Amino acid sequence: MNKKSTDKMGNVRTTVIFIFLLVGLLPALAASGFSFYDSQKALKQAISSSQKDLAIELMDKIDREIEYAFLLLRNWIAVNEIVRAAVEGSDQDGQALREEWLEDGLTENSTAALLKKLQATSQDRFKEVFMTDRRGYIIAATNKTSDFDQGPQDDPPDGELWWAAAIRQGEFCGRVSFDESAGVFSLDIALRIDSDGSPVGVLKASYNMEHILSLVNVASRGDSMHYELVNEEGVIIAAKERSRDRLLQDSYSVDLDDDLKWDDLVARQQGEAHGINQGGQEVLVGYAMSRNRGFRPATWMTLSYIPMEEAYEQAAEQFRGFAIILFTTVALIMLVSYTVANKVIVELGKKERMELELEGARKLQLSMLPREVPVLPNVDIAWSMQTATEVGGDYYDYALGQDGTLTIALGDATGHGSEAGTLVSATKSLFRTLSEQTDIAKIFTVMSRTLRDMNLQHIGMALNMVKIEGDSMQVSSAGIPPVLHYSSVSRKVQEILIEGIPLGFLAAAEYEERIFELVPGDAIVMMSDGLPERVNTEYEEYGYPRVFARFAEVATEAPETIIQHLLQGGADWAEGRPQDDDITLVVLKIKK
């Protein structure tokens, strides 16, 4: 073949290759371009949906916090001393009450002391608490009020707005305002006090909005995610980026597309939208209205938004890699371009929500525990909690009565995450309020009824409680591993197994209690199910008999030694496998 023919065949070969590349590549480029566009659209939808979910999640946390504040106050107005004070206050001479109010603000009587004690158990939720009789006269307060008469005699025809609403409807929730005297934003809550079905007074508390601000700040981590809580008029009442002096001054900071106004958001309750923030950036917005029923914060709304540019930042590298791979593996990149972006943003949203839930739940769990072990003349105490990777709901606490009675509680919520954290917080508050009562079974009944009223989606609190007074020990249990009692007389370990359903499942549950005599040298172990149910690499449980035997080996030793011996037994059994649940132990030793 001559040079001319060779050149011609080369030109034909080049032309055919070019045509095949052109015919094959153009459809591939078109298809890939469509896939790229479609994945951008899907990514945008995924981000918008994620913002709505985050707004709903934060609003639910805020709703539960407000509901818990109401629950605390409802629990307070059920205290016999509060009801009796309201009844007796209504029978006192009004002029004598006014003179006492002028002297000390009615902050020094026994009812005021009880209000201060209840206030101290609320974890700084209430900055001011006071109560009136059925006439509207102040009868007790934690701080002196500006007015003595809140009723119709001073403010006809019905009395102060909040007082009249509480008397008429049973409860009142005001609007967020700035409390100049306390230097905090607050929310007025008032509940009617009834006796035998008739109103006898009103309890009013100023809720500290710092708890709500804290929830918003925790959610607004980093520079990308932005959250705002707005009231019924669309005015910001909580936002990380806002200085405190701008709260209750500025409206929500996003101009929404499609001419969406505040009334449109209220009508839709929850959803997603697009808009422009004050920096001129295009943002994706999620919004959710409060689900609370029957009081004013039902018109609160959370807004969650993220700039589009920041939302796409992590997906951008995936698309740049897609452009390079396109010319070598067109078919593969068409599949990757459509799926990777969605997967990245969905997994990112899941991870962020999981980290937020885990961080908040772990912080709440650990804040519920006593900081120091008490030093007592008749009992040595030691305790330990080893938390699992996933935060559980283990809890322990103690109270020391004025007569020297020691009350110890150890519990395990039947769920995990923020719901378990809310249950632990409520249990701690109830324990602090009721621990001085002498009958554990009655304490459990009140706690179970109150927790049941919280409606925490089929979770409850398994709980052991021990009271030690002198040489007597009272024990009751609600669906948790048995208390172990080592007798220094018989030198044997006794299992105190008391059946009972976890608190919060039934409003009318009944519980049993037993009484035991103690002598010096006796030892008591309380535990959650994390140790006996710990599994090894073959998924075999450690088991209660091994725990009992392990305790018997060191029952005469100090409480700290007993705990370390029990934990080491579980660790040896697990053979390096991480624990699946919290492991909590409390050990008591009667001193010689």
Image (tube, rainbow, N blue to C red):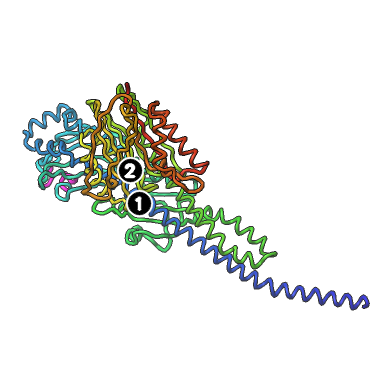
Point 84% across, 74% down: residue: 10
Which x, y percent locates residue 219?
A: 42, 47
Which x, y percent locates residue 218?
A: 42, 44
Residue 105 is drawn in which quadrant?
A: top left
- Is 515 situated left or right of 389 in this image? left
Which x, y percent locates residue 453?
A: 25, 49
| The furthest residue to the front | 490
* Mark 1 crowd level (few <14, some 14–19, many ≥20, 10 Å Cα): some
Stretch of the chain drawn in magenta: 155-165
Point 49% across, 45% down: residue: 536
Residue behind mark 2: 480
Secondary structure at numbered mark 2: loop
Q: Earlier in the sequence, mark 1 or mark 2?
A: 1
Q: Which residue type does callout 1 highlight?
A: Asp
Which of the two residues, 510 or 296, is positioned nearer the viewer here? 510
Which quadrant of the figure contains the C terminus? Answer: top left
- Is 509 situated left or right of 235 in this image? left
Count all numbered tags in the image, as a single digit: 2
Residue behind mark 1: 60
Which of the two residues, 553 or 387, is positioned nearer the viewer here? 553
* Mark 2 crowd level (few <14, some 14–19, many ≥20, 10 Å Cα): many
Which x, y percent locates residue 367?
A: 38, 37
Which quadrant of the figure contains the N terminus? Answer: bottom right
Secondary structure at numbered mark 1: helix
Which of the two residues, 343 or 510, is positioned nearer the viewer here? 510
Residue 242 visible, this angle: no
Residue 317 is drawn in which quadrant?
A: bottom right
Q: In the image, which is nearer the foreground, mark 1 or mark 2?
A: 2
Q: Which residue type does callout 2 highlight?
A: Ile
Mark pair 1, 2: CA separation: 29 Å
